[in-house]
């Protein structure tokens, strides 16, 4: 059965597991509950998940090829127990190679990385969504921008379009980031700006015309408060949305989660 595509927030560092007993702090409970409900919300359990994280950026679209990736604890200054987390999902190498082949057929160069582990944009939300680590996963990188340039949003949408056939093959496509991500503004002072950007982003994503939707997302920096939400050079947390939207095809995007964390408003979107 055809699977949807999602753009999800992955929180901040190991946020869902910060308490010494591994439990979730109250601020992150709503996001945790949303993530925990993703798999039950699907038409059927996916045969695999293809995930793109804001925390893997490569010179070309690359797939992870370690058979059993370790966890990459790419966060800093958190309690010691958060560096002992486990999430032992198998890497779906066949899916990784299938994704790369689809991208190659669409004219993209691809690469492989056999040394990298699951970064926290993967294992932190997936440890909540798939706690048993019993759905195979493959990870695809984002494409690094040219030096001094912004990420190419339209190009990432085009990559998502190339990956769209995977949805018909029972693969859940997930873009993992944060719809607002400005680490300099964590004191609540940006909340009104975050609300304005979130409303504009939701309107763009929800446009029933996929052409208009993709055009609006390609020019996301023109949305109200966009550069407060994602300062220049820091938009990697938004770009996974473009891949999910590209994979959506004609399926309309709908907001499926909205909450306030760290003084920001953040949202998740589902396509299909």
Image: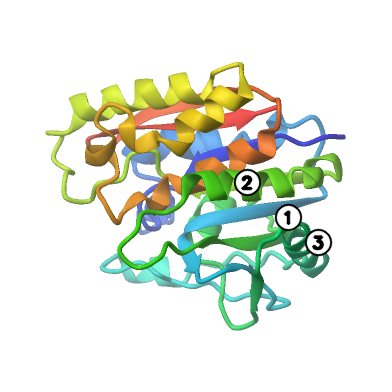
Q: Is residue 221 left or right of residue 23?
A: left
Looking at the image, which residue is at 34% across and 71% down?
80
- Estimate the x, y position of residue 188 in percent, counting from the top left: 15, 34
Residue beneath label 2, please?
158
User: Gap in Å between the C-alphas at discs 1 and 2?
Assistant: 9 Å
Q: In which quarter of the image is residue 88?
A: bottom right
In the depicted structure, whether residue 119 falls above or below residue 117: above
Quick one: SS at disc 1?
A: loop
Quick one: 235 or 178, which is closer to the camera? 235
For the residues labelled 1 and 2, say whether their Cβ atoms are less than 8 Å apart.
yes
> Which residue bears the numbered disc 1?
106
- 55 displayed left or right of 136: left
Residue at the location (73% across, 55% down)? Answer: 106
Can the viewer see residue 11 in this picture?
yes
- Per the image, label 3 sits on a secondary structure element best described as helix
**Could you say which quadrant of the image residue 263 lies in?**
top left
Q: Separation of disc 2 and disc 3 at Cα?
A: 17 Å
Proximity of marks 2 and 3: CB atoms separated by less than 8 Å: no
Point out the tag, 2 or 3, that comes first from the N-terminus.
Answer: 3
Image: 226 above or below 234: above
Which color mode does the image show? Answer: rainbow
Q: Identify the image quadrant of residue 234.
A: bottom left
């Amino acid at each position: 059965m055809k699977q949807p595509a999602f753009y999800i927030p992955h929180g901040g560092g190991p946020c869902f597991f910060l308490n010494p007993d591994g439990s979730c702090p109250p601020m992150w409970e709503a996001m945790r509950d949303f993530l925990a409900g993703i798999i039950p919300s699907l038409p059927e359990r996916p045969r695999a998940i293809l995930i793109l994280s804001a925390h893997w950026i490569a010179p070309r679209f690359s797939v992870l090829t370690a058979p059993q990736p370790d966890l990459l604890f790419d966060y800093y200054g958190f309690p010691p127990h958060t560096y002992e987390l486990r999430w032992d999902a198998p890497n779906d190498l066949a899916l990784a190679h299938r994704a790369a082949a689809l991208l190659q057929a669409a004219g993209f160069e691809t690469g492989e990385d056999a040394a990298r582990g699951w970064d926290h944009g993967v294992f932190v939300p997936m440890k909540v969504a798939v706690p048993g680590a019993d759905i195979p996963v493959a990870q695809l990188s984002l494409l690094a921008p040219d030096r001094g340039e912004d990420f190419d949003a339209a190009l990432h949408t085009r990559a998502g379009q190339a990956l769209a056939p995977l949805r018909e093959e029972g693969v859940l496509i997930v873009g993992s980031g944060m719809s607002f991500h400005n680490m300099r503004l964590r004191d609540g002072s940006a909340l009104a700006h975050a609300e304005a950007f979130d409303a504009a982003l939701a309107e763009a994503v929800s446009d029933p015309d996929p052409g208009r939707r993709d055009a609006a997302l390609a020019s996301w920096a023109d949305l109200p408060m966009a550069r407060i939400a994602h300062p220049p050079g820091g938009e990697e947390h938004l770009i996974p949305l473009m891949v999910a939207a590209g994979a959506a095809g004609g399926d309309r995007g709908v907001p499926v989660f909205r909450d306030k964390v760290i003084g920001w408003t953040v949202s998740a979107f589902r396509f299909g």
